[in-house]
Image (spheres, rainbow, N blue to C red):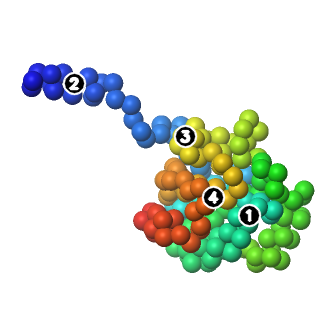
Amino acid sequence: MRKVIFLLSIFMFFFKTSTNANYEKKIYDFSIESISGETINFNDYKNKVILVVNTASYCGFTKQYDELQELWDLYKEKGLIVLGVPSNSFNQEKNNNVDVKEFCEVNFNINFPLTTITEVKGNNAHQIFKWAKNNHGKSAVPKWNFHKILINKEGMIEDTFASFTKPMSQKLIKTIENIL
């Protein structure tokens, strides 16, 4: 019996598959265009925790903008970056960046960084969403608007949260506080 356990242990050691991603790149290797047209270079966010959220103006979850702003206000001084990524991947976003920016500022008083309207799934997804899928699997692919990807200070995905997870939920806050 010991021999069988020993052989199984050796077999498992040599043929195990790691659940950790083999990151060839980290988030810091990418950039994205801001809603105002400037470049957001993720390298500027080194040693910060980044919450990437694909957003939309005409979604049932759009009210989460309030909590995203609250989260930003509470934790930005401690090193959290909230990044809203407006997307029309689910056909619920305005037609242009100017309208999205105005909508967010007027209705939700948003002052955390926003990107241009960006594809978040499929072949036309922005490279950061392809990177997330390649390194974290299907759970990193937005199934709907307000999907959240939490990136740790090392530039790797810590966890992902479905649209139903509110930004001020204990689950998300606890994870953020543990990695800040």
| For residue 47, side relative to residue 64 (left or right) | left
Spot occupied by residue 127 in the image (x, y as percentages of width and height): 69, 42
* Residue holding disc 1: 60
Query: Could you give the CA–CA distance between mark 4 and mark 2, rounded to whole angstroms?
Result: 41 Å
Question: In the picture shown, does residue 77 fall above or below 178?
Answer: below
How far from the left and from the top, in percent, is residue 177? 46, 69
Q: CA distance from mark 1 to mark 2?
A: 51 Å
Q: Quadrant of residue 19?
A: top left
The reply to whether residue 25 is in sight is no
Q: Position of residue 28 (x, y in %)?
A: 59, 50
State the CA–CA distance, disc 4 to disc 1.
Answer: 10 Å
Q: Earlier in the sequence, mark 1 or mark 2?
A: 2
Looking at the image, tell me whether mark 4 or mark 1 is earlier in sequence order.
1
In space, the residues marked 3 and 4 are separated at their CA atoms by: 17 Å
**Which of the two marks, 1 or 2, is nearer to us in this view?**
1
What's the CA distance linking mark 1 and mark 3? 26 Å
Residue 36 place in picture, x, y as percent:
83, 63
In the rendered image, which residue does mark 2 sit on? Answer: 8
Q: Amino acid at mark 3?
A: Gly
Q: Secondary structure at mark 2?
A: helix
- Between residues 8 and 114, which one lies in front from this camera angle? 8
Which badge, 2 or 3, is on the more N-terminal residue? Answer: 2
Q: Amino acid at mark 4?
A: Ser
Which residue is at 81% across, 62% downward? Answer: 58
Local secondary structure at mark 4:
loop
What kind of residue is marked 2?
Leu
Q: Earlier in the sequence, mark 3 or mark 4?
A: 3
